[in-house]
């Protein structure tokens, strides 16, 4: 049994002598591509075909029909033999699958330059004398997951048979899921299979030079799917390609790109992008990437949670001028959007038995950063590479702040340091560093090993000497364009050396300029050290590429992020621990939902911010989203299931590239193949088998090897598997330092601990009514404060404990009976010793830590802690601030109908008597915690028979008080619970020290001056 892969072309030419003496040639053409296992010799089959072709024409006067019959018999016999021995299979390129664990240093020398085929001009539909009847692209994006379909209908309008190509450029991070083709009524339908058998067939396909399949293009973000079919004149072909991808958030936007280059005018040309985001769409932008000619033709319609982008130029609009015959549609059609985020806790979605948790907090102060820039200045960097690098560094250095620390190492055969230690990003240091970079002259070899070790030593020394903030983010950014040539040159040894000295809280980011660099190596060494890699193209915008990459890592907001789920409700959770979160990006965790009677799923995310530790809660109803999806005409209902598999496969591919043993690699390989087949993804380890309905004809498509990238390396989330020219690198790729396959948490998730206040407390609520509980006298005393809107009243001022609680008044929307009603709209709790202030308003909760601040909404439950200060936020309910475990203040949120003509949202304040103040405490509430004796006597009927009156003796004063009640809203924020109390008139005069106006302070952080 041998494998045969060849094209057998049978041409039958018959010379006919007409009565008037003219000679006519008739030809019959057959083009059969054969692949499969056959018994016998392949050369014999080819020989028979050639003999059939050579023995067709006769000039000896014999019967044309006789010779035609004889020839056709031989052709039919040949076809019958072929049909009996194998299936007809059309091959589309494959990717080499390196199952053996070869030495990576040997593989780095196998890179090649772009082939001429890859450099040729791209056309979506290729062929001569063809008619493209339609070309349609439709993308359905649901919850950041896109399913794109490209369809085209083509007719061979030429006089003879020819090959017609169908080419689609797709994002590198996408997975092809299906390809179907209808040729003259014969339909080919695809299914993903394991790739073991395809490997040898692919090698033979390349040997005969078939231009088909996924072929790499010299593009930063795209790869090219190519296929072609040889059809007779008049044939009608319909192509349809499907691929899926997860939208990655970069610099605050999701970006969906479609490459449009039909290469000819198309009567029915249309692009539709449908977006559905359950929580809402905040913005949709369509950059003018196709040119000014089409700017008015792109239409966007949107609602709260849906958007539709359509591009439908007619034939005339596809032309640049009236008499032009070619289409000017040539470029990338881009849609950028972002979503509405209710809270920093993230967004949790459950659908189709799977969940996805999106985490993209904002309104947090950046963590300070420590950066060592390691720049290759070897001779190969001479020219545009160095010029662009210097230009980028000028802008990057300007971005540093005085809170950041940095240094620069440049290397060729030697290693030099601009500064031997990290220095602050002051204006003087920045200017000096810019001058240094400007004067770099590339020359010599490349000593990557020593340069990286020197960078790590610099960060270690700064950490040991406590030069840098322990909560800061430390990173190394390596910029290089070639392989090491000086010092240690073995890549695996360099990788081990760096791994050995790197600390767990350091990250390495690798930027490879051009194609001479071993990108596999840069990617591995970055992934192994909590970073990512990106290829930078050495062209006119290389500086912009460098700046864009730096922008993605220049603003770290969180460290050590972990998202946990109830262990009895979920399984197969993807990576849920992340080393860092950068502003404008997004962390995504997915998994399966186990059968349960529970109707709600909850997540808990913990992280460290600048000066603050966070615990954030998210919850969602498990069945709600599926109900909504059924109502949407253009939603992708299977998004959660596919997204989980997509993330899982990407992580496994990344883990596989770093597998320490062949056995481990084989195990991961099997996991990838199983998932890819189940979810129908074409990966580096699977192939798409496209076969006719009767299964007699087949076409095989898989992911090819990139000649500029080692075979089947890990690409993280950068592309459809591994070995890509340029992974679309996201700052948060699939880092191997976390468990790539994370089991469910070992302990069940419990709600954020809320420090419940005792039944009896001191409180201020409504407009504003004070209720003071006097435990020693076992009574409650009430009074009102009639101050003005904007005034800040001191409630607790304890300079001994270093704690102050103030509240600012707001007014109702309009007068009530010629009177202005006031409420507390802002509450501030300030711990002077900790340098932490918590400002609570009806809009948000802001935690100030020194010169940084973090903002949180009422729409998520969270727990925050900084030194001795803890903040507990209960979603849309209340906030509890605890200082040093012994002083607590709770702010209760009151929401009113937003169109209410009078009332406004306001806050209530609840303070327990158990708070342990110092002897210096004062304030409208604080002064009363030590009142030891209050007596009430001479209780008698008053003017209102339902309200008794009495005399109260307190602080040496005799006050006339009235029996009444006020409300405690802790259990019922709408109606409240009645609290009986003795009411002190005249804004508490006599019960409080001095006049209420004495408690007005200039700012929310002000302590009360002595009365």
Image (tube, helix red, strand yellow):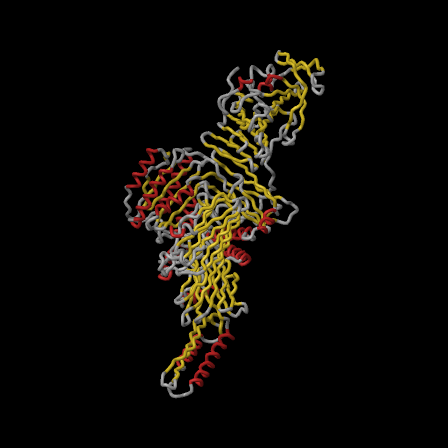
- 60 is higher (above) or lower (below) than 855: below
Q: Percent from the top left, x then y, of residue 36?
A: 48, 70
Count the numbered circles shown.
0
Q: Nearer the viewer, residue 903 or 870?
A: 903
Q: Percent from the top left, x then y, of residue 182?
A: 50, 66
Q: Can see residue 659?
A: no
Q: Nearer the viewer, residue 947 or 332?
A: 947
Q: Within the image, what quadrant is residue 807 found in? A: top right
- 72 is higher (above) or lower (below) than 301: below
Q: Percent from the top left, x then y, of residue 651?
A: 50, 51
Which residue is depicted at the point 31% across and 46% down? 386
Q: Within the image, what quadrant is residue 53 found in? A: bottom left
Q: Percent from the top left, x then y, of residue 910?
A: 60, 26
Q: Can see residue 151?
A: yes
- 987 is higher (above) or lower (below) than 584: above
């Amino acid at each position: 049994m041998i494998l045969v892969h060849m094209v057998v072309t049978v041409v039958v030419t018959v010379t006919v002598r007409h009565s008037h003496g003219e000679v006519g040639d008739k030809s019959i053409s057959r083009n059969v591509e054969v692949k499969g296992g056959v018994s016998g010799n392949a050369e014999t089959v080819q020989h028979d075909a050639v003999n059939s072709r050579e023995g067709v024409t006769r000039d000896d006067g014999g019967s044309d029909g006789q010779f035609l019959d004889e020839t056709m018999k031989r052709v039919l016999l040949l076809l019958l033999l072929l049909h009996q021995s194998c299936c007809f299979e059309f091959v589309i390129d494959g990717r080499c699958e390196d199952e053996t664990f070869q030495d990576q240093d040997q593989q780095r020398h196998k890179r090649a330059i772009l082939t001429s085929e890859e450099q040729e001009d791209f056309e979506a539909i290729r062929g001569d004398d063809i008619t493209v009847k339609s070309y349609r692209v439709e993308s359905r994006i649901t919850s950041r997951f896109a399913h794109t379909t490209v369809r085209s209908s083509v007719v061979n309008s030429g006089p003879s048979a020819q090959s017609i190509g169908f080419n689609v450029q797709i994002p590198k991070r996408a997975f092809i899921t299906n390809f179907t083709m209808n040729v003259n009524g014969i339909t080919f339908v695809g299914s993903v299979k394991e790739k073991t058998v395809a490997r040898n067939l692919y090698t033979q396909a390349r040997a005969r030079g078939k231009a088909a399949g996924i072929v790499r293009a010299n593009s930063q973000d795209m790869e090219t799917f190519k296929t072609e079919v040889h059809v007779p004149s008049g044939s009608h072909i319909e192509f349809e390609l499907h691929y899926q991808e997860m939208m990655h958030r970069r610099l605050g936007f999701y970006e969906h790109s479609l490459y449009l280059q039909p290469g000819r005018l198309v009567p029915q040309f249309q692009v539709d992008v449908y977006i559905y985001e359950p929580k809402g769409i905040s913005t949709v932008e369509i950059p003018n990437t196709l040119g000014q000619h089409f700017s008015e033709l792109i239409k966007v319609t949107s609602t709260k949670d849906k958007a539709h982008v359509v591009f439908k130029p007619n034939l005339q609009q596809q032309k640049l001028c009236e008499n032009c015959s070619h289409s000017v549609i040539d470029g990338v059609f881009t849609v950028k959007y972002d979503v509405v985020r209710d809270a920093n806790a993230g967004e949790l979605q459950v659908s189709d038995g799977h969940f996805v948790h999106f985490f993209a907090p904002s309104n947090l102060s950046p963590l300070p950063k420590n950066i060592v820039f390691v720049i290759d200045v070897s001779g190969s960097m001479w020219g545009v590479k160095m010029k662009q690098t210097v230009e980028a560094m000028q802008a990057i250095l300007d971005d540093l702040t005085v809170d950041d620390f940095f240094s620069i190492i440049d290397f060729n055969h030697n290693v030099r340091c601009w500064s031997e230690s990290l220095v602050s990003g002051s204006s003087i240091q920045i200017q000096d560093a810019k001058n240094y970079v400007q004067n770099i002259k590339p020359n010599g070899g490349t000593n990557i090993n020593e340069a990286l070790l020197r960078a790590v030593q610099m960060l270690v020394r700064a950490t040991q000497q406590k030069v840098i903030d322990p909560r800061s983010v430390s990173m190394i950014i390596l910029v290089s364009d070639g392989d090491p040539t000086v010092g240690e040159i073995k890549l695996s040894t360099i990788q081990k050396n760096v791994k050995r000295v790197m600390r767990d809280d350091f990250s390495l980011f690798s930027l490879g300029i051009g194609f001479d660099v071993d990108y596999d190596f840069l990617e591995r060494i970055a992934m192994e050290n909590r970073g990512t890699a990106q290829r930078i193209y050495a062209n006119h915008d290389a500086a912009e590429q460098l700046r864009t990459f730096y922008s993605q890592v220049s603003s770290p907001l969180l460290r050590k992020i972990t998202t946990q789920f109830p262990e009895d409700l979920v399984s197969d959770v993807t990576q849920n621990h992340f080393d860092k979160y950068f502003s404008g990006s997004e962390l995504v965790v997915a998994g399966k939902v186990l059968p349960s009677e529970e109707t709600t799923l909850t997540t808990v995310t913990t992280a460290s911010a600048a000066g603050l530790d966070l615990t954030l809660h998210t919850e969602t109803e498990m069945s709600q989203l599926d109900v909504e999806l059924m109502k949407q005409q253009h939603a992708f209902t299977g998004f959660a299931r596919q997204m989980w598999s997509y993330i899982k496969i990407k992580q496994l591919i990344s883990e596989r590239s770093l597998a320490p043993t062949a056995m481990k690699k084989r195990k991961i390989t099997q996991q990838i193949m199983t998932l890819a087949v189940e979810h129908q993804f074409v990966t580096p380890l699977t192939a798409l088998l496209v076969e006719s309905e009767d299964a007699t004809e087949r076409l095989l498509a898989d992911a090819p090897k990139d000649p500029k990238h080692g075979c089947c390396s890990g690409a993280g989330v950068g592309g459809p598997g591994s070995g890509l020219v340029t992974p679309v690198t996201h700052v948060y790729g699939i880092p191997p330092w976390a468990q790539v396959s994370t089991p469910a948490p070992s302990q069940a998730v419990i709600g954020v601990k809320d420090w419940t206040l005792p039944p009896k407390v001191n409180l201020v609520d409504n407009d504003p009514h004070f209720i003071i509980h006097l435990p020693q006298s076992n009574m409650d005393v009430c009074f009102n404060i009639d101050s003005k809107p904007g005034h800040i009243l001191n409630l607790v001022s304890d300079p001994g404990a270093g704690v102050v609680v103030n509240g600012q008044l707001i007014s109702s929307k309009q007068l009530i009976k010629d009177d202005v009603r006031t409420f507390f709209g802002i509450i501030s709790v300030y711990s002077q010793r900790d340098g932490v202030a918590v400002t609570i308003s009806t809009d948000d909760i802001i935690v100030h830590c020194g010169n940084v601040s973090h903002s949180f909404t009422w729409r998520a439950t969270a727990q925050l802690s900084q030194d001795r200060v803890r903040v507990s936020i209960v979603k849309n309910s209340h906030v509890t601030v605890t200082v040093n475990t012994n002083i607590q203040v709770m702010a209760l949120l009151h929401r009113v109908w937003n169109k209410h003509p009078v009332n406004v949202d306001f806050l209530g304040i609840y303070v327990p008597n158990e708070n342990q103040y110092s002897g210096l405490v004062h304030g409208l509430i604080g002064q009363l915690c030590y009142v030891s004796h209050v007596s009430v006597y001479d209780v008698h009927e008053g003017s209102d028979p339902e309200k008794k009156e009495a005399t109260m003796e307190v602080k040496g004063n005799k006050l006339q008080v009235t029996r009444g009640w006020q409300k405690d809203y802790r259990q019922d924020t709408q109606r409240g619970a009645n609290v009986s109390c003795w009411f002190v008139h005249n804004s508490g005069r006599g019960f409080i020290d001095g006049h209420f106006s004495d408690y007005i302070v200039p700012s929310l952080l002000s302590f009360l001056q002595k009365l």
